[in-house]
Amino acid sequence: MHSFKELIAQFSQQFDQWHFPGEPKHLYNAASHILGIGGKRIRPVLCLMGNELFEDLHQDAFHVGNAVELFHNFTLIHDDIMDKAPIRRGQPTVHMVYGDTAAILAGDVMLINVYEHLNKVQARYKQKIISVFNKAAIEVCEGQQIDMDFEKMEPEQVQYDDYVRMIGLKTSVLLAASLQLGAIIGGGSEGNQDHIYSFGKNIGIAFQIQDDFLDAFGDPDKFGKQQGGDILVNKKTFLLLKALELCNAAQRAELKKLMETSPDDKVSRVLDLFRTCKVDEWAEKEKERFQQKAFASLEDIAVLSARKKPLMELADFLLNRQQ
């Protein structure tokens, strides 16, 4: 068994040796840009962990991990264009450096390369691998569209449960599917695949709560994004939706006014309201609730407890991170 950090090192060593063609430079430099500015490599490592939970690491887990990492970065490029985001991982986003056209094409090229990697896996489970991946990929797109639809709605129109469902699609399903893909390669039973998928999905929701929290309250130098970026664009987040629920009428009116007028001190004033309404404390408890649901699913997986230790380390890394 390998630790989470050891698996990151193993995956990164082989992934970083993979390169796009040289021409046309503007296209492939744009594609290489996002891969060259880091990233936690969480999703591909989940493939490795899902595999190793059941048997020794297989090369197919690396092929699938490469595919998942390329797909994830493809979605980031396109999401940043849709969100008009200037910064990603502490660096200018692809479209800010290379323009929208090259960024869109770079994402497209990455998506096509996904299937080059998936097609390398053994025939005995290739069909299921591609089916599970495609389902997750479609759900990620559905989640992004729902998120964009939410942005056109008034905050009061977005129900908390609908937001959780959106996050489940946009963020969690790829984490969950990555684990399941590894479990398929490792020979995990259908029941164990369901349990590890549930673990990943609940960890993913807790991960997003932490992400929303860090956007508001984290250190921007560590987090790699501008502080309060979600607040500046009035993004519906766990924090905003819960604040509108917990605040009294006067506080709710002030919050709405800040969203409508966007004064220079908007971020600091919204954060003060979040703290007053104890949204920061709620976020910690809600993150813990989904974490415990994830651990219950992990407990149900029929393997020795020692084999689950790396996944426990993963949960601690994801949910207690500052970046």
Image (spheres, rainbow, N blue to C red):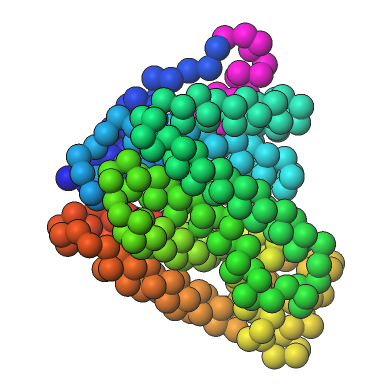
Quadrant that contains the N terminus: top left
Tell me what residue is drawn at x 54 percent, y 37 percent. Answer: 71
Q: Is residue 31 left or right of residue 254?
A: left
Task: Answer above or below: position of 78 versus 155.
Answer: above
Query: Percent position (x, y) of residue 218?
Result: 50, 60
Query: Percent position (x, y) of residue 268?
Result: 65, 67
Question: Quick check: can you spot residue 90?
Answer: no
Task: Answer above or below: position of 10 versus 265.
Answer: above
Q: Is residue 26 magenta?
A: yes
Question: Quick check: can you spot residue 44?
Answer: yes
| Residue 316 sits in quarter | bottom left
The magenta segment is 22-38
Tell me what residue is drawn at x 70 percent, y 90 percent. Answer: 248
Residue found farthest to the front: 124
Q: Is residue 167 magenta?
A: no
Query: Percent position (x, y) of residue 17?
Result: 39, 19
